[in-house]
Amino acid sequence: MSIEKIVEQALRDGYLTPAMEAEVARICDNASELSIDEYMAMDRLMAALLTGEVVTVARKQFINVMEELVLTEAIARVAEIQATSDRIMDVGDIAAYALNRLPPLYATTEEGGIYQRQRAKEELQELIAQQVSEAIGRNLDRPDFFPERQVIGKSSGKDLLKNVSNLLEQYAPNFEHQS
């Protein structure tokens, strides 16, 4: 999808989703130069975000309690292994492997999170430990490939205006919209 179409959709819907934000960033990162229409669309988006005509969709209005339980287990296990060996292990890879084999435990409130944590500790702790162990085994056996991999970036809604502004400055340092 083009920047213009993304901006049109954001203006029509009144919100900018994380996927739309990522697509705009991808287009800007891959373009050697943006067209005047793209600059103007980015300018319209920036103005709409500043006035509140378009709002960003919160990245998370819920949590997956399983993520924190798996990360806690993985960090503890990796720390034990790294204390006795010279192996460097990627906790993110280990957690992702285990999470792909475990049920999600979503919660939208603090009370729901407490309930899901308790339920998981009673019913799923053994399965969590087993999946983390399997993930560590796979991680230890895997060859060192794709060293150019890049970690998935994180940005929050409050960073969006800064990111759009930086993109505009980078790709259109001398462009100013004339009304």
Image (cartoon, rainbow, N blue to C red):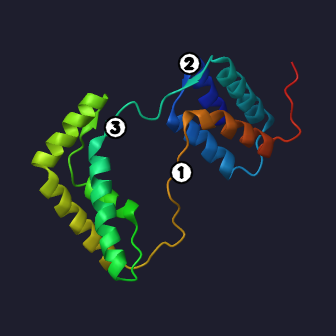
Horizontal and vertical percent position of residue 69: 27, 50
User: In this view of the protein, which residue sits in the foreground, 133 or 21?
Assistant: 133
- Image quadrant in which you'd find residue 127: bottom left
Secondary structure state at the residue bearing disc 3: strand
Name the image quarter holding residue 161: top right
Residue 33 point in image, percent of width and height = 78, 47
- Residue type of the residue flagged with mark 1: Gly
* Residue under numbered circle 2: 14
Please tell me which residue lies in front, 1 or 130. 130
Quarter of the image where the N terminus is located:
top right
The circle drawn on residue 163 is: none
Q: Amino acid at mark 3?
A: Ile
Which circle's residue, 2 or 3, is located before the other in the chain?
2
The image quadrant where one finds the C terminus is top right
- Identify the residue shown where x is 69% and y is 23%: 50
Q: Residues within 10 Å of mark 1 (few under 14, many from 20)?
A: few
Say which label, 3 or 1, has the lower sequence index.
Answer: 3
The crowding category of the residue bearing disc 3, from other C-alpha atoms within 10 Å (few below 14, some 14 to 19, many at least 20), is some
Residue at the left extreme?
Answer: 123
Q: Nearer the viewer, mark 3 or mark 1?
A: 3
Kind of residue indicated by mark 2: Gly
Q: Which residue is mark 1?
A: 153
Of the numbered discs in the image, which one, if any, rests on residue 63? 3
Q: Residues within 10 Å of mark 2 (few under 14, many from 20)?
A: some
Q: Residue at x 57, y 41 (%)?
A: 23
Looking at the picture, tell me which residue is in the foreground, 4 or 131. 131
Structural distance between the alpha carbons of marks 2 and 1: 25 Å
Secondary structure of the residue carrying tag 1 is loop
